[in-house]
Amino acid sequence: MKNILLAFLICSSFIAVSQIPQSFNYQAVARNTSGNVLSNQFISVEISIRDGSPTATIVYQEIDTATTNQFGLFTLAVGTGQVQVGTNLIAINWATGNKYQQVEFDSNGGNSFTNMGTTELLSVPYALYAAKSGNTTDFAVYLETASNGIAPSTTLLLILIG
């Protein structure tokens, strides 16, 4: 029984380590309308994911806040902000075609957003779909009994994660 428990704990640790982040990075430099860098300033950014075209339906939207550094640079983890539309980033059906990211910005950290444009998402978010590989089964389970006569009660459960 101890061996079964040990095997289960070892396999559980592999599963925990193999989880992918449920977000992706967005990085930009914040500037005012004159093109001057906004250094060390609290800002808010609204990120929308559109399905199929730059003007299509928004399937996910969140608001993030950040403070720029001395160069106006800020980084967000899209998927960790305050959700406005949708449930979460992983709930997006990435397999249904092209997705577009629209970025809106408020240099005062509020909710008066200015549209900064929309661009097609290319590889990274689709890794969220690739983690599922389009399959309903994400791993294979094999039962292996030692050939040295160990009783089946100490059978090792081996889980392979692809």
Image (cartoon, grey):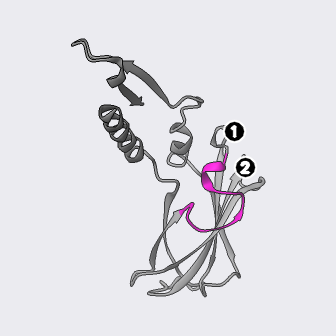
The amino acid type, in three-letter code, at marker 2 is Ser
Magenta residues span 78-92
User: Of residues 148 and 77, which is closer to you in this image?
Assistant: 148
The amino acid type, in three-letter code, at marker 1 is Thr
- Crowdedness of circle 2 by 10 Å Cα count: few (<14), some, many (20+)? some
Q: Position of residue 38 (x, y in %)?
A: 49, 85
Residue furthest to the left in view is: 148
Q: Quadrant of residue 13?
A: top left
Q: Residue at x 62, y 76 (%)?
A: 105
Residue identifier under label 2: 53
- Crowdedness of circle 1 by 10 Å Cα count: few (<14), some, many (20+)? few
Q: Is residue 76 left or right of residue 57?
A: left
Q: Tell me the quarter of the image containing the C terminus.
A: top left
Q: Is residue 31 left or right of residue 60?
A: left
The disc label shown at residue 96, or none: 1
Q: Quadrant of residue 137?
A: top right
Q: Residue at x 47, y 83 (%)?
A: 37
Q: Is 17 drawn above or below residue 117 in the view shown?
A: above
| Among the two numbered marks 2 and 1 on one chain, the one whose residue lies closer to the N terminus | 2
Q: Is 46 drawn above or below residue 9 in the view shown?
A: below
Q: Position of residue 40 (x, y in %)?
A: 44, 87
| Circles 2 and 1 in contact, beta carbons < 8 Å | no
Kind of element beneath mark 1: helix
Q: Tell me the quarter of the image containing the N terminus.
A: top left
